[in-house]
Image (cartoon, rainbow, N blue to C red):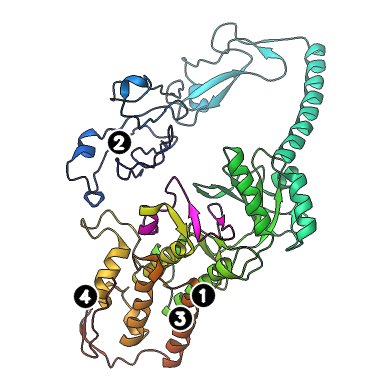
């Protein structure tokens, strides 16, 4: 699903289809049918209906499409005014719908002599000349013809030698462009956590030529591998870098990651600068992420004690980044999918692709483009485009709401006005109906007073005014106290509830007043 926000926003960058007035979604491979559908979200505003009337979708080749917000259509002939404008489309093709094995047994088999058949991804097949000096058209008689053996051998040897020399020069070029010499000097002078400088061949061998993808997102692709020398499983992140500014930012982040040493932050093992974009090598965390354990019905349910433990450890990691790291770091993509769990369900905060250092004397980071994950973003960040440590606190509040309710941050299947978990949670607590929004079974693990206190903490984090939110260190300390309180209770005795049916719980006592969320 591609999500477009308010069309009238002034923050859109030319040529960027980033979700602000224009959004795009890749078409998966190997499909034989594709249909687009535009659905208007009434929560986004636009009482005039302008956006709905002007919304359209089309298929096009992504590298040639340009998006221009300019209202002066005549000044830019490439501006997409209507669907009938020309947009290139790239099509894949194959012969028939038979595989090579099936087609070779038929009279209509298209591959001529000295050619081989290759199965196409979406069914059907193609033909190509055999290797070893054959050339020609594999579809037309007499097919492919072989060249003399001596000349091809000499040519191949020369090409191999040229390729090796070019490859060596290319790796050196990438190493310098990625700041290898600068990074080496910085690490030597600053010390910090010991990390390895891997060669690309080592990582190719560890990942079977980067064949096993275990994660993919807006900031890069993550591969799983095993280091040959130590046998240690690792996760290798290939980041998306498109310009020099982002390359410099990535270098700074890499330096900072070498300074981080926290139990609940995924450990950086090393890096590789011999590729077009730098590769980061992290410890591999085997027990999926928190999102999986909350929302996957096939996993064993997490107890309230386990949830509070995970929340406390995650809050501790974020508090460390905000206040105890050498330079303050704002994570900028706090969500349950970025909290990994090891075999003992210890939390490990991961994915620093969006993270930024906070310069001395600054309270936050000013972004021209709104970036982040829908449902977790601080509403004040939407208004100001300034991301602060309190924006991380808001996102963490959404994670806490997920832990308590088992609901997803955004669910378009819910009724209009009820699709946002954070808003629903605040309403429920304000109306003294917090029990009704909690996950089934939660009320059997703590007293009503304890659940109310936990919900109040979530509401503090979700406060629309960032200044009124607690710091991550305060959140961590309160979660620690809550864990101890719930453990001391040693379960829930049942005195506050009377079970009236299998799916209904009636509140008897005590009665709590609504909290006030605004000044």
Residue picked out by circle 4: 431
Q: Nearer the observer, disc 4 or disc 1?
A: 1
Q: Residues within 10 Å of mark 3 (few under 14, many from 20)?
A: some
How far apart are the two marked residues, 3 and 4, measured between alpha carbons?
Answer: 23 Å
Question: What residue is drawn where x is 41% and y is 40%?
Answer: 18
Q: How far from the left and from the top, in percent, is residue 233? A: 67, 58
The residue closer to the viewer here, 192 or 269, is: 192
Question: Along the polypeptide, which appears first: circle 2 or circle 1?
Answer: 2
Question: Along the polypeptide, which appears first: circle 2 or circle 3?
Answer: 2
Number of the label disc, if any, that sits on residue 473:
1
Element type at mark 3: helix
Magenta span has 362? yes
Number of the label disc, if any, that sits on residue 36:
2
Number of the label disc, if any, that sits on residue 400:
none
Q: Quadrant of the C terminus?
A: bottom left
Residue picked out by circle 3: 478
From this viewpoint, is residue 404 visible? no
Magenta span has 502? no
The residue closer to the viewer here, 70 or 405, is: 70
């Amino acid at each position: 699903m591609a999500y477009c926000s308010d069309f009238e926003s002034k923050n859109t960058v030319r040529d960027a289809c980033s979700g602000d007035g224009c959004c795009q979604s890749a078409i998966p491979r190997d499909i034989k049918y594709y249909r687009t559908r535009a659905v208007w979200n009434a929560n986004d505003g636009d009482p005039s209906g302008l956006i709905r009337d002007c919304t359209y979708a089309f298929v096009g080749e992504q590298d040639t499409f340009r998006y221009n917000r300019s209202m002066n259509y005549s000044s830019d002939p490439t501006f997409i005014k209507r669907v009938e404008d020309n947009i290139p489309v790239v099509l894949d093709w194959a012969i028939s719908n038979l595989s090579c094995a099936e087609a070779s047994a038929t009279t209509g088999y298209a591959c001529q002599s000295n050619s081989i058949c290759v199965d196409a991804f979406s069914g059907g097949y193609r033909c190509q000349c055999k290797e070893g000096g054959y050339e020609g058209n594999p579809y037309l008689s007499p097919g492919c013809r072989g060249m003399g053996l001596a000349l091809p051998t000499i040519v191949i040897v020369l090409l191999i030698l040229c390729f090796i020399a070019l490859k060596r020069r290319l790796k050196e070029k990438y190493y310098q462009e990625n700041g290898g010499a600068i990074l080496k000097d910085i690490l030597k002078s600053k010390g910090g956590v010991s990390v390895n400088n891997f060669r690309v061949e080592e990582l190719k061998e560890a990942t079977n030529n980067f064949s096993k993808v275990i994660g993919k997102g807006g900031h890069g692709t993550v591969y799983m591998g095993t280091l040959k020398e130590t046998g240690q499983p690792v996760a290798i992140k290939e980041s998306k870098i498109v310009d020099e500014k982002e390359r410099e930012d990535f270098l700074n982040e890499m330096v900072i990651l070498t300074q981080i040493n926290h139990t609940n932050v995924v450990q950086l093992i090393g890096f590789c600068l011999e590729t077009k974009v730098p590769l980061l090598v992290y410890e591999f965390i085997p027990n999926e992420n928190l999102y999986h354990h909350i929302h996957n019905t096939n996993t064993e349910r997490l107890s309230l004690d386990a949830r509070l433990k995970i929340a406390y450890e995650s809050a501790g990691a974020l508090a460390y980044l905000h206040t105890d790291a050498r330079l303050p770091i704002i994570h900028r993509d706090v969500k349950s999918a970025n909290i990994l769990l090891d075999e003992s369900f210890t939390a490990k905060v991961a994915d620093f692709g969006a993270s930024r250092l906070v310069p001395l004397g600054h309270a936050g980071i000013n972004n021209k483009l709104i970036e982040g994950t829908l449902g977790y973003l601080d509403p004040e960040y939407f208004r100001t485009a300034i991301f602060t440590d309190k924006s991380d606190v808001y996102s963490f509040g959404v994670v806490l709401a997920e832990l308590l309710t088992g609901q997803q941050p955004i669910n378009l299947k819910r009724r209009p006005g009820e699709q946002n978990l954070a808003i629903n949670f605040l309403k429920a607590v304000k109306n003294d109906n917090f029990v009704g929004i909690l996950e089934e079974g939660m009320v059997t693990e703590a007293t009503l007073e304890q659940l109310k206190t936990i919900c109040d903490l979530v509401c503090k984090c979700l406060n629309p005014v960032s200044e009124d939110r607690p710091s991550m260190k305060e959140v961590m300390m309160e979660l620690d106290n809550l864990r101890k309180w719930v453990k001391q209770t040693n379960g829930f005795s049942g005195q506050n509830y009377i079970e009236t049916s299998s799916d209904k719980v009636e509140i008897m006592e005590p009665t709590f007043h609504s909290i006030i969320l605004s000044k």
